[in-house]
Image (spheres, helix red, strand yellow):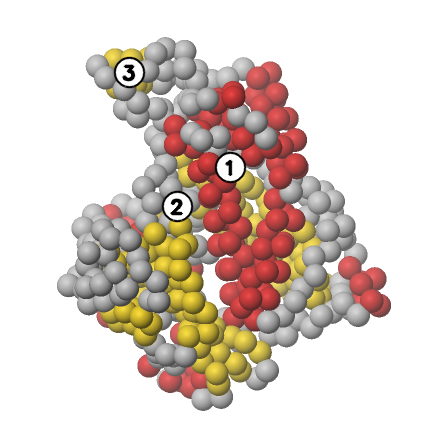
């Protein structure tokens, strides 16, 4: 789908926080986390933090890591509900500092950067053109006279934490495309990023370093997913988009593709994550590669699924197929760190041109991009579909056969990984060095 000359317009107000929800219920996040601490300790240097980001997280940790006591080498925190007056003060502090962080503007710039890298299109950011408050609906029709065909409006509605014994960070964005000539929306979608869960004390250490990392990963994941949905996957039939959600049949789950995007070919592995692996026995196994400069290989595009039915009419007309490869180092107590990236690879395998450290674990992923009718299209980043993602927090379950089956088998509501706006760490392709 062509959007013509497009500008990106971020909202001019900060997202909501969920500090009130945290203050209104008990959270036991420190139990067993630290041994030998004394009563009255609040977090780890919690109030010694400085700067906008630290000030954002400080009220959350003040709510969930209130005074701890020692018993048999483990800590147990039983926190009373906070008074309304204190909650109001904390909310004001969070709101003020969320405004300072300029989260919608940061996400808008991440989208513009990803779009230029992935599609070659440049979309200027219009900082003063987006909605000024939640119920505002800017009239973008005046932009048509300036040669602007469409506005990509970016509103970050929520940032915060969910969880009890451990917390995950989330960011929720609403994105719509407005055609300036008519002033009408032609696209709307909610995008959600949700991190792994970490114990409460990890969020407050090193002046909220973990939050810095997760905030950046949220920007990159959401921006990548937005560009993927609006541009790379646009116009492709459902089967070529990776198979997802309500489009997934029980036959697909049991006998269909085990990957989103391009499948993993090598390094060789002696296991296969499965939909019925509800206890995740297999997903965390890292195949040992033979060298510190391993050769990674993946499925070529078009795949077999892309050569059938309506997909064949599109894939028969593509050209300039190339591949992008990313490798992340697995980090204990934090999100994976991108350490290696190659773009525009011509073939379906790659021997690393850098030596990786010994005895380390790594995640990796690959995607295809190609030219079609004057535009750049592409696949999703490759990952395993299993284990399914347990719908919780801001990630909702879908009305699909997989969700129904998951409830019957495991008592949980799974979400097809192919429909997420991020790759869960459980689902990355992986290896370890000798």
- Residue 55 horizontal side relative to residue 354, left or right: right
- What residue occupies the far left of the structure in this picture? 270
Q: Nearer the viewer, mark 2 or mark 1?
A: 2
Disc 2, disc 1: CB below 8 Å?
no
Taking 381 as reference, is 346 above or below it?
below
Closer to the chain start, of discs 2 and 3, is 3
Q: CA distance from mark 2 to mark 1?
A: 17 Å
Which picture quadrant has residue 315?
bottom left
* Mark 1: secondary structure: strand
Give the spatial CA distance, label 3 vs label 1.
30 Å
Q: Residues within 10 Å of mark 3 (few under 14, many from 20)?
A: few
The residue positioned 59% from the left and 51% from the top of the image is 107
Say whether disc 3 or disc 1 marks the residue closer to the N-terminus.
3
The x, y position of residue 306, in whole percent, is 39, 80
Task: From the image, tell me which residue sits under label 3.
Answer: 36
Q: Which residue does the numbered mark 1 point to in the structure image?
A: 160
Classify the position of the C terminus by image quarter: bottom left
Please indicate, yes or no, whether residue 252 appears anywhere in the rendered image. Answer: no
CB atoms of marks 2 and 3 within 8 Å: no
Q: What is the C-alpha distance between the residues marked 2 and 3?
A: 28 Å
For image coordinates 27% across by 45% down, the residue present is: 411
Q: Is residue 111 visible?
A: yes
Q: Quadrant of the N terminus?
A: bottom right
The crowd level at tag 2 (other Cα within 10 Å; few <14, some 14-19, many 20+) is: some
Instruction: Find disc 2 in the rendering and name its residue.
Output: 335
The residue at the point 61 percent across, 22 percent down is 88
Residue at 39% of width from left, 46% of height from top? 335
Q: In x, y percent, where is residue 276? A: 21, 56
């Amino acid at each position: 789908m062509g959007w013509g000359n497009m500008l990106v317009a971020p909202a001019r107000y900060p997202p909501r926080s969920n500090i009130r929800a945290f203050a209104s219920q008990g959270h036991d996040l420190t139990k067993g986390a630290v041994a030998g601490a004394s009563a009255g300790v609040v977090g780890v240097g919690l109030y010694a933090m400085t700067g906008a980001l630290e000030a954002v997280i400080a009220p959350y940790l003040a709510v969930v890591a209130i005074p701890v006591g020692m018993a048999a080498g483990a800590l147990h925190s039983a926190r009373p509900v906070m008074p309304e007056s204190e909650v109001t003060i904390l909310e004001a502090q969070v709101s003020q500092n969320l405004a300072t962080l300029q989260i919608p503007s940061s996400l808008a710039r991440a989208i513009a950067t990803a779009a230029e890298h992935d599609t070659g299109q440049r979309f200027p950011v219009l900082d003063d053109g987006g909605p000024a408050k939640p119920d505002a609906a800017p009239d973008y029709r005046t932009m048509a006279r300036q040669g602007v065909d469409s506005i990509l409006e970016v509103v970050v509605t929520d940032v915060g934490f969910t969880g009890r014994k451990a917390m995950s960070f989330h960011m929720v964005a609403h994105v719509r495309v407005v055609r300036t000539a008519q002033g009408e929306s032609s696209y709307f979608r909610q995008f959600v990023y949700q991190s792994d869960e970490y114990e409460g004390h990890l969020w407050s250490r090193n002046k909220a370093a973990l939050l810095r990392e997760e905030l950046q990963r949220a920007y990159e994941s959401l921006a990548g997913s937005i560009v993927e949905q609006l541009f790379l996957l646009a116009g492709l039939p459902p089967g070529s988009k990776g198979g997802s959600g309500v489009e997934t049949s029980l036959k697909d789950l049991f006998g269909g593709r085990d990957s989103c995007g391009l499948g993993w070919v090598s390094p060789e592995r002696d296991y296969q994550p499965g939909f019925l692996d509800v206890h995740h026995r297999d997903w965390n196994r890292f195949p040992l590669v033979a060298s510190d400069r391993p050769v990674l290989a993946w499925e070529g595009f078009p795949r077999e699924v892309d050569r059938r039915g309506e997909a064949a009419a599109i894939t028969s007309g593509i050209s300039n197929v190339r591949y992008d490869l990313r490798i992340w180092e697995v980090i204990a107590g934090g999100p994976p760190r991108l350490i290696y990236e190659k773009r525009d690879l011509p073939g379906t395998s790659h021997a690393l041109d850098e030596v990786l450290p010994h005895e380390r674990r790594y995640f990796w992923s690959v995607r295809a991009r190609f030219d079609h009718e004057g535009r750049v299209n592409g696949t999703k980043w490759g990952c395993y579909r299993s284990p399914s993602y347990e719908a919780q927090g801001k990630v909702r379950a879908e009305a699909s056969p997989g969700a129904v089956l998951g409830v019957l088998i495991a008592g949980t509501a799974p979400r097809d990984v192919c429909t997420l706006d991020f790759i869960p760490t459980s689902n990355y392709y992986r290896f370890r060095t000798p």
